[in-house]
Amino acid sequence: MAAEAGKTTAATKSGGGGQIMTVVRGLDVARYMGRWYEIASFPSFFQPRDGRDTRATYRLLEDGATVHVLNETWSKGKRDYIEGTAYKADPNSDEAKLKVKFYLPPFLPVIPVVGDYWVLYVDDDYQYALVGEPRRKNLWILCRKTSIDEEVYNQLVERAKEEGYDVSKLHRTPQDDPPPESDAAPTDTKGVWWFKSLFGK
């Protein structure tokens, strides 16, 4: 997953009746690494329903092809997190289509769960991004900062709508400024949030 110059976009067929979805090509992986704050997303069972300050931190491993993924969120004053890895779905393609693998449940990670992570848009400065997947069941608006200009946010929402996503499902993620430190709150080591999320709580 080495860095590639000349970022462009490509139309590709996906789920949802064979609709075309635009995916970034030539993603500069090295520039994409680091911390991204979740500005909005479709709710997911991977996160507590009342989660806030949700963020993802990506780090390219020594093999140059695998990304370490750390997803964090805060719920009821406790830090919840899950770690995994990401890699290109097709190593020979320049499309920003990745697979992300996590192991569940978080307190006894033995069951592998693999999902799609498609970068649909990233600005030239790699400050905000739109991420989805072929079934259009998940969507994320990410930013390097805890807040995003409302005009930019609306443009990303409109772009997602054009790609066939039901943007009415988007949920704005509360973000504190400054953001919490990872070691500044107790960590939920029992996975209580994961069990609650399975029951919609």
Image: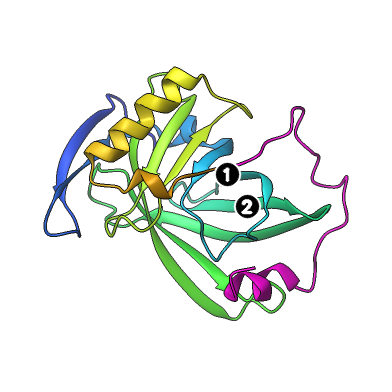
Choose between 40 and 8: the one closer to the eye. 40
In this figure, which residue is indicated by the disc labeled 1?
59
Whether residue 145 is in magenta: the answer is no
Counting other residues with Cα less than 10 Å from the Cα at mark 2, is it few (<14), some (14-19), or many (20 or more)? some
Magenta-drawn segment: 173-201
User: In terms of depth relative to the viewer, which is nearer, 169 or 62?
Assistant: 169
| Type of amino acid at the residue the image marks with label 2 | Leu
Height in image: 185 above or below 178?
Answer: below
Foreground mark, 2 or 1, reads 2
Location of mark 2 (residue): 70
Q: Secondary structure at mark 1?
A: strand
Position of residue 182 measured from the top left corner of the image (x, y, whole percent): 79, 46
Q: Is residue 142 left or right of residue 12?
A: right
Residue drawn at (47%, 34%), measured in percent from left and top? 32
Residue 199: x and y in percent read 60, 76
Q: Is residue 138 left or right of residue 176?
A: left
The residue depicted at 50 percent of the width and 36 percent of the height is 142
Residue type, label 1: Arg
- Across and down, in percent, residue 138 comes to 40, 55
Q: Quadrant of residue 155?
A: top left
Q: In this rendering, would 54 be left or right of 162? A: right
Left or right relative to 2: residue 78:
right
Q: Position of residue 111 (x, y in %)?
A: 54, 80
| Quarter placement of the N terminus | top left
Asked if the stretch drawn in magenta spans residue 179, the answer is yes
Other-residue count near label 1 (Cα within 10 Å), few / some / many at <14 / 14–19 / ≥20: some
